[in-house]
Image (cartoon, grey):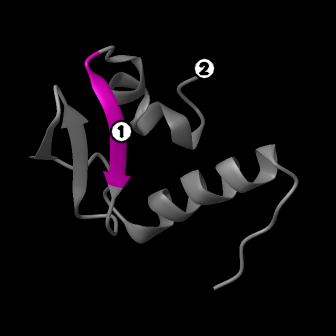
Amino acid sequence: MTTNNAYSLIEPLMKDPQIMEILIDGYKHLYVERRGELLDVPSPFESEAQLYALINELAQQYGASVDE
């Protein structure tokens, strides 16, 4: 993955083999499931725009679009 895409913000979490799930609750709140425990981790998103960029990138991979 390149550092120019929205994935780059969560790429370290996605590559961590101990993380089973990533939960995003708005751009300020991010949780991961690690070893069966849900942990509150610092969010890499600085704005809603960054989060929306990730959502749009994910949707485009599946041929979908996202509206407000």
Q: Residues within 10 Å of mark 1 (few under 14, many from 20)?
A: some
Residue on which the image places disc 2: 1
Q: Residues within 10 Å of mark 2 (few under 14, many from 20)?
A: few
Task: Answer yes or no: is residue 31 visible.
Answer: yes
| Mark sitting on residue 2 | none
Q: Residue 6 versus residue 34: which sits nearer the camera?
A: 34
In which quadrant of the rendered view does residue 14 lie?
A: top left
The x, y position of residue 38, in whole percent, is: 15, 45
The earlier-in-sequence mark between 2 and 1 is: 2
In which quadrant of the rendered view does residue 10 lie?
A: top left
In which quadrant of the rendered view does residue 48 lie?
A: bottom left
Residue on which the image places disc 1: 21
The x, y position of residue 37, in whole percent, is: 12, 38
In the shown orientation, is residue 40 left or right of residue 54?
left
Tell whether label 1 touches label 2 (CB within 8 Å).
no
* Residue at image coords 46%, 60%: 51
Quadrant the N terminus occupies: top right
Q: Which residues are magenta?
A: 18-23
Residue type at mark 1: give it. Glu
Q: Main secondary structure of the magenta part?
A: strand
